[in-house]
Image (cartoon, rainbow, N blue to C red):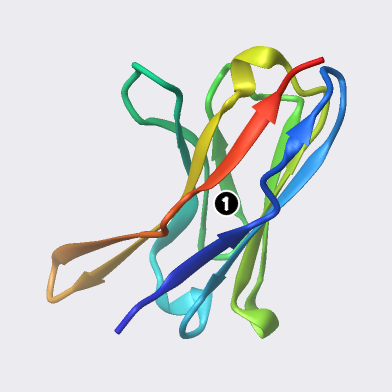
Amino acid sequence: QVQLVESGGDLVQPGGSLRLTCTASGSIFTFDVMGWFRQAPGKERELVATISDGTVTKYADSVKGRFAISGDNAKTTIYLQMNSLKPKDTAVYYCYAKRYVSYVANHYWGQGTQVTVSS
């Protein structure tokens, strides 16, 4: 059974930094894609960043140049380094993983961690 556990969410002032961590059961290289989504109050869940094949990354335009996603296969963990945080980054951040089995995509989600950017 795949489990994703997030940590690192906190209250931070605008311009500050946070590092989110997602620990997955099993090696992340068994997943085709891992990443982070976020959901602000009253809004739909949106993609923040993904990593595939351990090194190929993709970012939402709103976070490019400020956020960085990375993976550590030895620790079955991915990270989201968030710099220059803005109030609009306030949301619950969810870890996500996708694995293809016999050409069928299986999607997995963590429980979420709250990030609040406020002075």
Q: Is residue 103 left or right of residue 38?
A: left
Q: What amino acid is found at the position of numbered circle 1 in the picture?
A: Val
Give the vertical position of 33 relative to 19 (above or below). Answer: below
Give the vertical position of 107 relative to 88 (above or below). Answer: below
Question: So how many labels did they put on this image?
Answer: 1
Residue 65 locus on image (x, y percent): 75, 25
Q: Is residue 97 left or right of residue 118?
A: left
Quickly name the residue at label 1.
56
Give the vertical position of 51 relative to 74 (above or below). Answer: above
- Residue drawn at the location 57% of the way across and 40% of the way down: 114
How crowded pointer 1 is (Cα within 10 Å; few <14, some 14-19, many 20+) is rated as few
Residue 116 locus on image (x, y percent): 66, 29
- Residue drawn at the location 41% of the way across and 21% of the way down: 41
- Residue drawn at the location 40% of the way across and 70% of the way down: 31
Between 101 and 86, the one lying in front of the other is: 86
Where residue 70 sits, quadrant-wise, is: bottom right
Where residue 98 sits, quadrant-wise, is: bottom left
Between 65 and 13, the one lying in front of the other is: 13
Residue 87 locus on image (x, y percent): 68, 14
- Residue drawn at the location 70% of the way across and 53% of the way down: 8
For the N terminus, the image quarter is bottom left
For the C terminus, the image quarter is top right
Q: Is residue 98 left or right of residue 60?
A: left
SS category of the residue bearing label 1: strand
Between 44 and 60, the one lying in front of the other is: 44
Q: Is residue 45 left or right of residue 58?
A: left
